[in-house]
Image: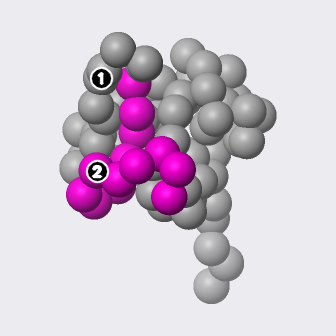
Amino acid sequence: MREIKTRIDDVLEFIQDRKATTFNEVSVETGLDKHTVEKFVDLLSTSGLVKVKYNLLGPRIYIGEETSMNE
């Protein structure tokens, strides 16, 4: 059976690989505009697959426990 891969899968995979990232990094890496990335991340967050933390430097997207952006 063929696997069907969507753009939201690309977003999730990138976040999983990075562990912690920003909306801008996801946008650049996946080639999606920031508005689309925000919609996808909102869906993934609502589903409990990713978490978003807002701070003074801007929102961070991460999976699992919050990690440093430099890891």
Q: Is residue 67 left or right of residue 26?
A: left
Which percent across, then down, holds residue 48? 23, 50
Question: Where is residue 11 drawn, in percent x and y?
Answer: 57, 46
Q: Answer few, some or many: residues within 10 Å of disc 2's Cα (few below 14, many 20 plus, some between 14 and 19).
A: some
**Three-letter amino acid code of the residue under disc 2:** Glu
Of marks 1 and 2, which one's residue comes earlier in the chain? 1
Is residue 16 shown in magenta? Answer: no
The rendered magenta stretch, by its main secondary structure, is classed as loop
Picture quadrant where residue 2 is located: bottom right
Vertical placement of 58 versus 43: above or below? above
Going 35% across and 53% down the picture, which residue do you hit?
A: 67
According to the image, label 2 marks what residue? 66
Q: Secondary structure at mark 2?
A: loop
Question: Residue at image x 31%, y 21%?
Answer: 55
Image-quadrant location for residue 52: top left
Of the pair 11 and 67, the residue shown nearer to us: 67
Residue 62 seen from this side = yes
* Stretch in magenta: 59-71
Element under label 1?
loop
Quarter of the image with the N terminus is bottom right
Residue at point 28% right, 42% down?
Answer: 51
Residue 43: x %, y % from top left: 35, 36
> Is residue 61 covered in magenta?
yes
Tell me: residue 45, above or below residue 18.
Answer: above
Asked whether residue 15 appears in the rendered view, the answer is: no
**Residue at 35 percent of width and 30 percent of height:** 42
Q: Determine crowd level at label 1: few under 14, some 14-19, many 20+ residues with C-alpha closer than 10 A.
A: few
Q: Indicate the amino acid at tag 1.
A: Tyr
- In x, y percent, where is residue 4? 63, 64
Could you give the CA–CA distance between mark 1 and mark 2, rounded to whole angstroms?
12 Å
Q: Which residue is mark 1?
A: 54
